[in-house]
């Protein structure tokens, strides 16, 4: 059976990349494109699907939602999914703690997958980081990330997740990442059209270990978005990570 997907943030960089990627999946189709009122009203629809700024008007058109937008429209989409009892996979980053609480509460009613990075390569890097960090206690840790100039949040969701993975494996609280007491330092650079580079540097007096992931094409995230959408649709209500999907389905 074909999985029918509503794409929230359809006209954005990731929304369009996911639309392209859907051509490579015979069992999935983007059937509804959702974006802001402004964008929907100002664009000519050459996409051969329905465009809307309100997914609740077309509930019969989709089984599951993929969201790559901004935190506020993402929370609005989650609330609509709760109302409609439909699953959602969220790639949006930059949520504050109150918004994360809303997501957590919503996951008691519907299945939600929340992943600041949907690429298999980065998620395997998370696993390697956990392993390395367990051994390299006492090393100074710096996470450097580079993204395009239009990226809104900083440090990136992936950089924060990397820091969380390291701290969990070292049994140390990450705490406030903006505080000078944070055990991990961050450097964020915004340049050109860079898709996303993350480098973690462990430094001690006598050596240095560097782990780097370079995203060369958005299709790596788009593939994960479609795969997780197909998977999350069939899960019980709960809050899932990309790792939960990876361990169960890949
Ligand atoms: N998880 C991942 O693997 C991953 C990868 C890349 C980007 N991201 C994140 O995904 C998000 C989107 O990134 P992008 O580069 O596509 O951004 P973008 O700015 O190109 O696209 C965002 C889209 O959301 C739309 N939007 C704004 N208000 C809306 C509303 N009310 N309803 C529906 N849509 C609305 C915008 O008009 C825009 O088209 C960001 O948070 C980014 O950090 C995550």
Image (spheres, rainbow, N blue to C red):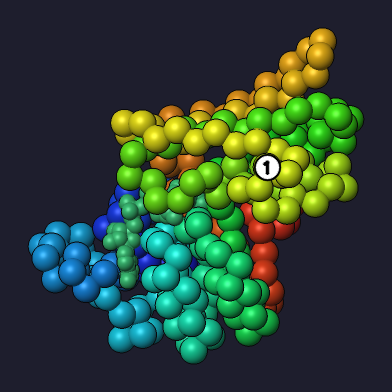
Residue at (79, 45) in percent of width and height? 167
Image: 160 above or below 106: above
Q: Nearer the viewer, residue 107 or 48?
A: 107
Image: 11 above or below 55: above
Looking at the rendering, the quadrant in which ligand 1 lies is: bottom left
Image: 22 above or below 100: above
Q: Nearer the viewer, residue 82 or 61?
A: 82
For label 1, the SS is loop
Q: Nearer the viewer, residue 109 or 235?
A: 109
Q: Position of residue 219 (x, y in %)?
A: 42, 41
The answer to which image quadrant residue 181 occupies is top right
Q: Report if the beta carbon of the residue with label 1 is closer than 8 angstroms to ligand 1.
A: no
Can residue 59 be seen here? Answer: yes
Can residue 217 be seen here? Answer: no
Image: 127 above or below 33: above
Q: Looking at the image, which residue sits at the far bottom?
A: 83
Residue at (40, 62) in percent of width and height? 70
Relative horizontal placement of residue 38, taking residue 239 as reference (left or right): left
Residue at (48, 40) in percent of width and height? 220
How many marks the image carries: the answer is 1
Q: Position of residue 50 (x, y in %)?
A: 24, 72
> Which residue position holds label 1?
180
Q: Position of residue 209 (x, y in %)?
A: 73, 19
Relative horizontal placement of residue 205, taking residue 115 as reference (left or right): right
Q: Looking at the image, which residue sits at the far front?
A: 180
Residue at (46, 51) in percent of width and height? 153
> What is the crowding at mark 1: few (fewer than 14 residues within 10 Å), some, or many (at least 20)?
few
The answer to which image quadrant residue 204 occupies is top right
Q: Nearer the viewer, residue 43 or 245?
A: 43
């Amino acid at each position: 059976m074909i999985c029918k997907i509503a794409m929230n943030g359809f006209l954005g960089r990731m929304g369009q990349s996911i639309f392209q990627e859907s051509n490579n999946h015979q069992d999935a189709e983007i059937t509804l494109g959702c974006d802001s009122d402004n964008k929907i009203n100002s664009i000519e629809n050459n996409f051969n699907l329905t465009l809307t700024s309100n997914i609740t008007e077309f509930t019969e058109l989709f089984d599951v939602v993929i969201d790559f937008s901004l935190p506020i429209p993402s929370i609005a989409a989650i609330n609509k999914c709760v109302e409609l009892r439909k699953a959602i996979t969220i790639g949006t980053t930059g949520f504050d703690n109150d918004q994360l609480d809303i997501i957590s509460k919503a996951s008691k009613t519907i299945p939600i997958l929340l992943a600041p990075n949907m690429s298999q390569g980065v998620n395997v890097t998370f696993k390697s980081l956990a392993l390395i960090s367990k051994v390299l206690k006492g090393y100074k840790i710096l996470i450097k990330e580079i993204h395009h100039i239009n990226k809104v949040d900083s440090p990136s969701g992936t950089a924060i997740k990397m820091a969380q993975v390291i701290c969990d494996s070292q049994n140390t609280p990450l705490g406030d990442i903006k505080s000078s007491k944070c055990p991990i330092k961050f450097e964020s650079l915004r340049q050109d059209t860079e898709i996303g580079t993350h480098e973690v540097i462990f430094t001690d007096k006598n050596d240095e270990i560097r782990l780097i992931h370079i995203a060369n094409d958005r299709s790596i995230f788009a593939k994960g978005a479609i795969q997780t959408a197909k998977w999350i649709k069939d899960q019980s209500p709960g809050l899932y990570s990309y790792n939960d999907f990876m361990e169960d389905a890949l």
